[in-house]
Amino acid sequence: MKSGFGMGRTVALAAIIPATFAAAFALSTCRGENLDKPPVRGDFPGLLDYAFLPTDPKKPNPNFADLGAWQGICLPPTGPAPGAAKAVLGVTGPYLADEARWAGPWLSRFRALGEDGVDRFAGASLEASSEPGLFLVSAKGLGELRAELRTIFISRRSYLSVLSLRNEGAAAQVFDPAFDGALFEPCLLEGFSEGVATLNSRGGRLLVRPEFGAAGLLEKPAEGAFRIRGPRRNLAAGETARFAVTVSYLPRGEDGTEESALAKAASACVEDSFAENEARWNGYVAKAAALGPERYRGIAVKCVQVLLGNWKSPLGALRHSGLVPSTGVRYFNGFWAWDSWKHAAALAAFEPELAKEQVRAMFEFQNPAGMIADCAFPDSAETNWRNSKPPLAAWAVSRILAKTGDLGFVREVLPALERYHAWWYAERDQDGNGLCEYGSTDGSLEAARWESGMDDAARFDGALMARSGEAAWSMDRESVDLNAYLAAEKAELAALHRALGGNEEAARHAAAAAALCRRVGGRFYDTAAGWFFDRKADGAFVPGAGPEGWIPLWCGVADGRQAAAVARALRDPERFATRLPFPTLDAADPRFDPGAYWRGPVWLDQAYFAVSGLRRSGLRSKADAATTSLFEGLGGLMTAGPVYEHYDPRTGRGQGAPNFSWSAASLLLLYEEYGEKVAPPLR
């Protein structure tokens, strides 16, 4: 039987990257030869496809946001407008993430209305593209008018579109500039004052502010539509005019005074706003590109786009910024604990202040017993306290410390980390033997499965629940991944205390980590199978091999013999070295189903743990080969496709939510560790 990662399937890079995407990769490779000129965002056009025209307010789609905005926008369809349709010379949307709906197909489409009332850009052929942090739309209209539109976010509540209109003809052009919008119910036009249209959405308000000011006039051409017309312009041959509009979303009744002042100032100084945006995004690009090999820089920059596109600012019960899993799915409008630790670990490398906020965001939802909620939302009534999530918080904080050296942040969060760690032993160690189980606060197996993060995993088939406290229930099995995570967290807590000079606490945690490593390695490893398994209360191994079996390698629990056996299984194409490696259930298991959530699909966080575990076990070449198979086998990753929630191990086709944050975080961590002799230690 052959073993390896994608053996016989690896092809030349040029053969798998379309020409439209290859330029970004080729240019980024050349940049590495000139270290004095780091890559910039313009080197990476079109990494994600944002083209979308909403027709159903409740049908989400991957969209672009920045700076923590709760509204996201898309690019208009390109090419000539079909039939009687009019070109959308603007951006589409916005999608209101907290309301999980589109406000309308567009709110700020530019029109150049001739004296005959005909729009000079009706039916025009559009071109649209994106660079990290920037939307670009262009069109050529009647009378040799050429329009170039640039759109960026200028704050956590507003985006700015600036249109440059040039008369390339021989004769002057006379027209009335206008911005118009089309609305979905229940978004309504509420008022118009000083040239600003106020729209009332279900949860907040939208302000559409062209730079016409008080000279702007409101028109209502049809039901659910509005138009703000500016003063007539006479554009001489060769002359260029500029028109700016800001769209602000104020969720949940926020006062708009400060945001209105900001939007007005941005419209008056647009080039300053664009220069600031470009400098910030060039910084992200340079930092991300420097983390790993030149060959895959485009992947790293794409992951940064995904992560920052899911960034959300404080709102309601969410008092800190953080990342939602995906703005492409209606119910992903909050922060999840397990996701958050992974987000923070990746963000630490290029946006460390946001990484800190992501950690703080979840510690806001820690109860007096030390438990951290599964997920939290702007509406606190939706926060899930039925279960927690696997403990990776100290690892995330250690990543932030390693990237920033910020001991103040460690001092701030260390008490909460200690309480969270202690909670597992207080409420998830039913028999008090020092080995924990996944469980729930309501006694339900459903919530206990959620607590594992692997909701429908085969290893929980037939599990029963038993009560161990007033609001503490556990499964009738001890899970190897949970206890391996806890061993790694003890080691991380030791390192954090040591960094602060707490040598006594550091020594206590280090000794506990070493002892737990020995126990986990001895209790959960099946020598005959060469794999780590959960164990039932009666001591029997739980059948079915999944990611829980390779987590001990990443956590530093497995000894050399154990790691070698697990690595052999990971390189077996009949089991885990599938076309896209690391399915979440052994492909030889009769329950294996590539479309069944945690019973076969490849989840990239678990793939990262597998690769990093191989590297930590000294198998550098195997780890790099696996990373290559993942990077080149994930459908759409090296084209303009989204980064999906999970993937089919047989085909590499994306499944689940598009532009999924922890997938992007995991890919960025894989990129950073690619080629390293040893993965960063879990102490």
Image (tube, rainbow, N blue to C red):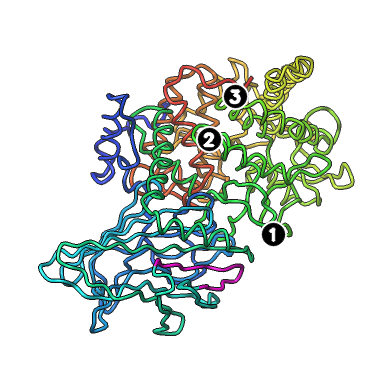
Of all residues, the one furthest to the left in this rendering is 170
Q: Which residue is under mark 2?
A: 346
Q: Amino acid at mark 1?
A: Asp
Q: Residue 549: give x, y in percent of width and height.
A: 61, 30
Gap between marks 1 and 2 measured at Cα = 27 Å
Q: Which residue is under mark 3?
A: 405
The magenta segment is 198-211
Vertical arrangement, residue 585 with respect to residue 551, above or below: below
Residue placed at 75% from the left, 14% from the top? 503
Vertical arrangement, residue 45 with respect to residue 431, above or below: below
SS class, disc 3 = loop
Q: Residues within 10 Å of mark 2 (few under 14, many from 20)?
A: many
Q: Residues within 10 Å of mark 1 (few under 14, many from 20)?
A: few
Main SS, magenta region, reads strand
SS class, disc 2 = helix
Residue placed at 47% from the left, 48% from the top? 644
Give the number of the mark in front: 3 or 1: 3
Give the number of the mark in front: 2 or 3: 3
Gap between marks 2 and 3 measured at Cα = 16 Å
Q: Which residue is under mark 1?
A: 379
| Residue 209 visible (yes or no) | yes
Q: Earlier in the sequence, mark 1 or mark 2?
A: 2
Residue 338 shown left or right of residue 473 in the figure:
left
SS class, disc 1 = loop
User: In the rendered structure, are the residues bearing label 1 and label 2 in contact, judged by CB atoms less than 8 Å apart?
Assistant: no
In the image, residue 210 lies in the stretch drawn in magenta: yes
What is the quadrant of the C terminus in the image?
top right
Q: Amino acid at mark 2?
A: Ala
